[in-house]
Structure formats: structure tokens, C-alpha cells
Image (cartoon, coloured by chain):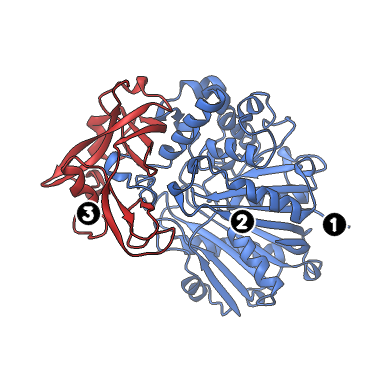
Amino acid sequence: MKLGGSVAIVAVGVTGQGKLPGRDGDDLAIEALGYALDEAQIGKEQIDGLLTCKAAGTDAGIDTAVGRKAGMNPAFSATLDYGTCNFTLHLAAMAIAMGMATTVACLYGTNQKTGRRFTFTQAAGDEGSPGGPYGFQHVAGPAALAFKRHQSLYGTTEEQLGHVAVASRGWAKMNPQAIFREDFTLEDYLASPYLVRPLRRPDVTMISDGGVALIVTSAERAAEFPKDAVYLLSGAQQTGLRLYQNDDQLMRPWIGAVAERVYADAGITQSDVDLLYIQDPTSVWVLQMLEWYGFCGIGEAGPFLESGAIAPGGALPLNTNGGQLSEAYMWGWLHIVEAVRQLRGEGGERQVADAKVALYCSTKGFEKAAATALASEVPG
Amino acid sequence: MASQVDQRPLPDLEDPVSSPFWREAAEGRLSFQQCATCGYLRWPPAALCPECWSRDATWTPVSPEGAVWSFGVYERAFIAAFEAAVPYVVALVELDAGPRLIANVVDIAPSEVAVGMRVTAVFEPFAEGAALVNFRPAEAA
């Protein structure tokens, strides 16, 4: 999807993150929208598109309920059954491009931590092959299989993978919004207990409560908002819905198709990317997507990580918010918020100098992948 | 009393589409629905062939041998039913016949399991006339 900067994010809103007892997901999403409206200096009646995202394991995130609770009658509204924000952002861009709406609020909210509704005990692969009877629970299961395969093919080490969690923490320490900010070294990583060998606890996302909102509009309208707009250059998706009917499904080779399209449609290459965001329910997602998006060769992510490239001060600023391993688990939505803040120059202590282009890559489990290229300026 | 989340999830033997798989396993056979139109082996069980959309299929035994595509060793149980089993191996096995199954690898120390290892199916009864399919190392040729 070529966007060429025709659509822009003009405001973001984020609630507190962590344990928020007594709040439900819709309540948190609406609170986040309030902050985004404040930032945009508009009222809720000026939102004519509402996109919500179901929160896994809870009843939250249905557009009809959120509209009722927030007292909104937008021209267009819809619910996505899955998160990571890319999918929602692409739907917002399409709605704006097609004239279904001019000013779209994209919302996500969850109480998955205190509500104890989402505990990762679900079977990790029942759709592709019944896994529950065999104790194949938790996302760490398929992620462990994917990493073990990578190790077997390419000689990747646990220590190399450990650089993902360590670098995430390095960035999170500079992010006041991050939940995990304690020192965390490679030695700490290697001393952590295994969950599903070869993966350890720090390879897997935390669970947390919170809400996030974005306001998306056309480039023409973007100038009317007080904050610097962040423009969408392109968006691309690819599915692997056949699951284990596909070869090498857990390696997700079809992500490569997203990479080809997102770069071609944006008119950029990997070398133009100043900021890289990879949604990270496990560290293995980072390893895989560094390769599929061409930041290193296939099979070369281990040495690439070991080189320190993604740590603060490295050649490739990655998940400068700390990601889901250290900041908070907002199903990828905070990665987009961080891209917006960095491209506006609001990164504070962790600001990446002269950052103009960001790429956000995410997946919906082993079923879908998506990416968005964003920039601080409309391409000339 | 164990809560639902503490219990081992087991296949639904009332499901007419998938239950023959577990019933065949109890007879020592690894069988899949073979499409009557295009010959494709369906996995997981389905009412419709994902290749050609034919509804006709015959449960057909296949070779129980395959190779470990990859595996992980659960060092922690995420539901109570598996606490006694830790550490246990979950693998994705690519059958020589084509389908890829999630299953346990048994009769071998977890540290001895390897990617690419040849395995053969073994059957673990879980109800009257129904068994799960696991894998153990294949005999050397």
C-alpha cells in the first residue's frame, strides 16, 4: 500500500502502564483517547472514524461498546480481532484514503494483568496441530522450536539471543514509562531460569494493563494539529494462515514478502531506516524479523546481535522504548507511540539524533505479518 | 478440586470430524483423511480439503516415521497437569507422508533429542478406544 505521506498520525495518548486494578480495557482505551484528544486539541465529536482492537482473553475492544461508553457516533467504526497496531493503522489509512472518515481514532486497552484473563496458558498451536494434550502451552513453546531450528541451521547461540533482552533493557532504562528498568546484563540473562529450553524468562514478554490511542488523519488536515505530524509512507501485510501446512512455518519465511512490499511502496531500503521497531512477544521475533527485513542476512542474526548493533549507541536503534520485554505489553501499540515520539524529537534521554524514517514490523502470532514505514517529513 | 486450567486438555471424542484420528491411534494406526479427489492428506482433521475443497475423504493409515523439525524442552509446566512431566519435550515432527504434527518425544533423555532426528509414532491411550500420538527414536536402519 503506497501512501507517500498522504496519511499522518497527529496525536498519541498513553495511560499509565502496569497493574491498574479495578479498570477494564475499554475504560483504559477511552482514557488514552482523552490524552490523544488533548494533544490534538480537538473534541471527541471531531472523530469520525473509530477503530478498536479486541484485547486477548477479555471482552474489551469492541467498537460498538466503546462508542457507546465514550458517547461517540462516528461515521465509520470497526473492530479488529487482533492487535499489534499495524493492522489497525492500515485500516485507518484505507478508511481515510477511501473517504470513509477524515479523522480516525485507533484504540487499544486491556486489563490482562490484574484481570488475570490472559495468562499464556492457552495451547500454543491447537489451530495448526492440536498441542494442548502434549503440554504445548505458552508462546514460549513455538518460539523455542523456532529458535532451536535457527540454532541447528546456523549455529546461533543462547548468548547471542540474550542480546535482545539486554539491549531492550538498556533502552528501557532511559524510558520513564517502562515497567522494567533495573540493570540487566548478559550474565543476568544467562543465569535466568529456562521456561522452554532454549528460551529463558527474559526472552518472553511481561503481561501488563494499560491503554493506547492514536489519531490518524490526512496529510492535508495534519497541518491543523499542534504537534508535528508523523507521515505514513507505506504499509504491507502477508499471511501464513495455512499454519503447519506451510513449509518451515515457525520460521515465518512469508514475512519476507512484507519486507519487499513495504520498502518498494515507500521508495526506501533498509539503509534509509533510522529507527526500527519490532513487536516482541518473545526475543525470537526480533531475531527472525531482523533477517526477513534485511538488516542482516538469513541465518546471520546471531553474530549481528552479538556485535552490539541494537544496543543503545549501536548502529541500528531498535525498540528504543524497551519493547514488550522491558517497557510494557501493549501488543505492539507502544512501539508506534515510540516511533511517533522519536520522529517528533520527543525521545528525551533516549532520543536518536536526526531520526527521520522509522519502520515498524509486527506479526499476529504465526498467522499474519505487517509493517509500516513512517517519516517525519512528506517525501519530496 | 482441579480447576479446568489445571487439567490436561484432551481431544474431543464427540467431534465427528477429528475423533477418528484418535480412535485409529488406539488401534496402533497413524491415519489421516486422504482426499478422495486430489489425494491430499488433511491435518488437522477438516470437513473440507484445503487444497481442492472436496468434502470426500477416507481415513488412510500412513507410515509412522518422520523427522524432528525442531523441539523445545519444557522446564516449567504452564498448567498443573504437566508438573510431574517436567522436563518434557514437545516437537514438530514432519512425517515422511507429509503432515506435520505437534507431539511429545518420549523414550529418550531430553538432552539427547536433536533436530533432524528420525522418529516413529507411539500411541498413548487417554480414554477407552482413543490414544494420543507421540514419537520415539526410530530404530537405526
Q: Colour of chain A?
A: blue
The image quarter containing residue B30 is: top left
Q: Is residue A267 left or right of residue A135?
A: right
Which residue is nearer to you in this view: A356 or B124? B124
Q: Give the chain coloured red.
A: B
Identify the residue position indicated by label 1 in the image.
A379
Q: CA distance from mark 1 to mark 2?
A: 22 Å
Quarter of the image with the N terminus of chain A is bottom right
**Residue at position x 33%, y 29% in the image:** B119
Task: Look at the image and tell me whether residue B74 can be seen.
Answer: yes
- Asked if the residue under mark 2 is in contact with the one under mark 3, i.e. CB atoms within 8 Å, the reply is no
**Residue at position x 38%, y 32% in the image:** B67
Q: CA distance from mark 1 to mark 3?
A: 57 Å
Task: Give the number of the disc on residue A237.
Answer: 2
The image quarter containing residue B101 is: top left
Identify the residue position indicated by label 3 in the image.
B19
**Residue at position x 73%, y 48% in the image:** A358
The image quarter containing residue A322 is: top right
Image mark 1: chain: A
- Circle 1 packing at 10 Å, graded few (<14), some (14-19), many (20+), is few
